[in-house]
Amino acid sequence: MESPTTVPAYDLRVSIQDTEPEIWRRLLVPETITVPELHRVLQTAFGWENRHLFGIRCVDRLGQPRVIVGPDDAAEEMGDEPASGVVLLELLDAEQARASTLEYEYDFGDAWTHLVEVMGPAKLQVGAVRCTGGANRGPVEDAGGTYGYARLIEALADPAHEEHQELSDWYQFATGKDASTLEPYTFDAAALNRRLDELAKRLWPEPPTDEEIDAVIRPVQWLLNQAGTDGLQLTQDGYLKPAVVNQAVRELDWVYRWPGAANRESQTLPVLMLRQQLQAWKLLRKSKGRLVLSPAGRKMHDGGRRLWDYLAEAVAFPAEESTAIVTRVVAHWLLEGTMPSWDQRQRIIADTLTVAGFRMERGKPVPQDVAQDLYLDVRWTLDCLQLKVPEQTFSEEPALTDGGRKFLLQIQGLLDGM
């Protein structure tokens, strides 16, 4: 029996309370969406960055008051109902237009309260979320609630305002963007729907196809094939020979990543990192001046889903715990399409590691230069796989392929299950 192409859905109007002019969105979401999934949809719809706790207050369809908090560990500490496992169908009645409502609060400090109203039932494509209307961009994260955000808009719009310079500096620090880029009264439904399409693929991913698997593992598979049963002869210094380096750059379409002669491995970083990473993943090893398949490499030589799963485990669980933490952060940025500016990247990673309990000598917090090195290590590791759409120039914010997104989601799932 073929699966249906549409599913029952809610037509919701979501508005942020006490905003003037009102910030609102009209959204179609499936009836079976869970509260954590709805949270992700609302984060995307209003441009939030998922930095804070969230909660839902309502009277459910059985007439019971509910206070639901996420993530679950926060709910446990606060003595409230955890969000996981709660389905929106328990809380709202699609037939009770305007009468069936709930409050979604994000960031208990700034207290952004969103009123979610049912406008009626709807139909929706399987695995989709849509926005059918809205007005005004979402507030700036950590702006200080509705009053603070209104003050920010006023100050940034008026160079003569007494707080203009101070809040301009804060805005650039907080967002990585110039203050002139704030456009509080704009809303682009088409752009939001593109982001919601990407979110839906992350919320309800399909298994990777054989073609997607082959594309993602292609660089690894290529070098395993080159080693073959006889291995690759190395130079006296232990590097791949120039002909192999040049062949790798050409056949893996890496010319855009490393334009140049590509005839020495020590000066062709993508190839160097690929070879070293396959050794770190215990797929290749050096033996008597040759690069040969390890026992694991011989088992994985044919590629496919077995190699995909092996690589996902290797990326998710590196030797160092600090690298695993940075991998989680970087995977999140790539999946969400929210790669921070270079300065913010270092600061966030350093703070994350420090909060996780990592310290330098004499108990000092993790410095930003160490965070930078760890970030680069993780990015080079991920770049040993083909996770992004091929580009003509090297990009710090690559567009993920469907296979790349599924691979990173598998890594996230492995890390979340720790």
Image (cartoon, helix red, strand yellow):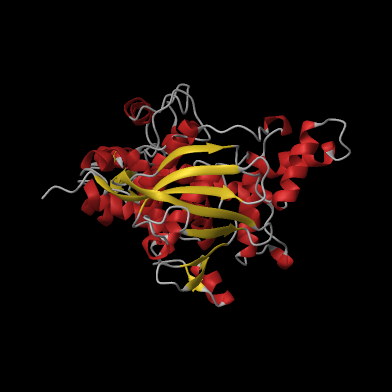
* Residue 235 sits above or below residue 346 on the image: above
Examine the image and state in which quarter residue 172 appears: top right
Q: Which residue is drawn at 44% across and 29% down?
A: 264
Number of labels in the image equals 0
Q: In this view, does 215 lie to the left or right of 350?
A: left
Q: Position of residue 397 (x, y in %)?
A: 51, 35
Q: Position of residue 275 (x, y in %)?
A: 39, 42
Position of the C terminus, as image quadrant, is bottom left
Q: Nearer the viewer, residue 316 or 227?
A: 316
**Does residue 334 appear in this view?**
no
* Residue situated furthest left in the rendering: 1
Q: Nearer the viewer, residue 356 or 206?
A: 206
Q: Is residue 78 left or right of residue 143?
A: left
Q: Position of residue 109 (x, y in %)?
A: 68, 61
**Does residue 258 appear in this view?**
yes
Examine the image and state in which quarter residue 248 appears: top left
Q: Nearer the viewer, residue 405 or 155?
A: 155
* Residue 227 sits above or below residue 50 on the image: above
Q: In this view, does 84 lie to the left or right of 155?
A: left
Q: Residue at x 47, y 43 (%)?
A: 26
* Residue 270 sits above or below residue 320 on the image: above
